[in-house]
Image (cartoon, grey):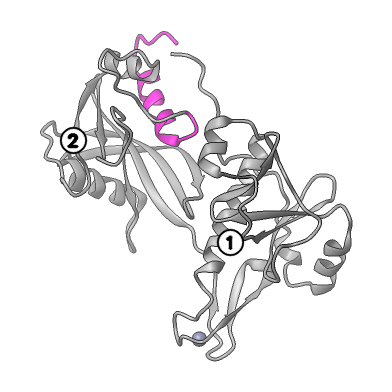
Amino acid sequence: VPHSPALAFLGNSLDRCANHRTDQEWLGRLLKQPSTRHIHMNGDRTVIVDEKLQTFQQANSAEMVLLGVDGNGHGWFASSTASEENLLDLRSLAVAGVLPPGELAILAQARSLLHWHARHGFCANCGAQTEMRDAGYRRHCGACATEHFPRTDPVIIIAVRRGSRMLLGRQSAWPEGMYSTLAGFMEPGETIEEAARREVFEEAGVRVGEIKFHSNQPWPFPSSLMIGLIGEALTDDIVIDPKELETARWFEEAEVRSMLEGKHVQGLKTPLPMAIAHHLIRACLRANPGEVD
Ligand SMILES: [Zn+2]
């Protein structure tokens, strides 16, 4: 199995400066500095020229969010644009791997925040218009005084194994031949383990016992946190939920390895290294005794 490149959207090195977000004087000074950089986003796309992230001296709209301050003391802000020029989406950027990982992570932060603001212009409690506060980390309803905070949606994603086999499934919307680990949104009142066991049973009818945390990944489509797990199955029989999955089955280790290497005889494949599923699948192989990396 070849060396696996890093997960996408990790390594954001900005100081988010949470203590300064309410300090209008501090924000004003930062905005006036000529070194301050503004990212313009149109949905999940941003401006890329010659494989480089383009930043600007001005925000594109009155509502801008503070991303943070970099190691050189330069402020980073993001705002939405309607421009269609030189745009590339975050998925394509992650797959292409042309941007420094830290920049991709900053773009993920920008995309999730701006997406939330674009959909929370009105108070969920009383319906009145809300205003951005705290440099983009709060919206305030002047009518009923409710405070609204940007959301992150936790998603469990789990590689389930049983001895030398691994449970992988596919959704009909995925590229042909692609199989991956099972995943689903956590529900209110659940622990991570409870959510994982529920999802695997709902989607594939398999009972899971022991679960270990492996890694996690911000996933800005639009604002998820992927919580990567490895679980040990207690049962073999698979009963898929056709609303969730097109199919699911157990894969022997050798077959999974051929999929990771892109050498599967029927062209079956796993997700790319930009996604956490790839690394969960790989970790399951490594954990097997006798494995030579
Ligand atoms: Zn309100």
- The CA distance from mark 2 to mark 1 is 36 Å
Instruction: Determine the residue located farthest toward the bottom in the rendered image.
Output: 143
Q: Give the camera-side residue of 217 and 91.
A: 91
The quarter of the picture where the N terminus appears is top left
174 relative to 283, above or below: below
Identify the mark at residue 247; answer none if there is no mark: 2
287 relative to 100, above or below: above
Disc 1 secondary structure class: helix
Asked whether the viewer can see residue 7, the reply is: no
Magenta span: 273-293
Q: Quadrant of residue 267?
A: top left
Label 2 Cα neighbours within 10 Å, binned few <14 / some 14-19 / many ≥20:
some
Where does residue 87 sit, x and y in percent of width and height?
61, 46
Identify the mark at residue 34; answer none if there is no mark: none
In the picture, measured across the screen, residue 82 lies left or right of residue 155, that is right
For image coordinates 56% across by 68% down, the residue present is 117
Where does residue 207 sit, x and y in percent of width and height?
18, 40
Label 1 Cα neighbours within 10 Å, binned few <14 / some 14-19 / many ≥20:
many
Q: Amino acid at mark 2?
A: Thr
Asked whether the viewer can see residue 1, the reply is: yes
Q: Earlier in the sequence, mark 2 or mark 1?
A: 1
138 relative to 275, above or below: below
Q: Which residue is mark 1?
A: 114
Where does residue 248 sit, x and y in percent of width and height?
20, 34
Q: Amino acid at mark 1?
A: Leu
Q: Tell whether position 218 is magenta.
A: no
In the picture, measured across the screen, residue 92 lies left or right of residue 25, that is left
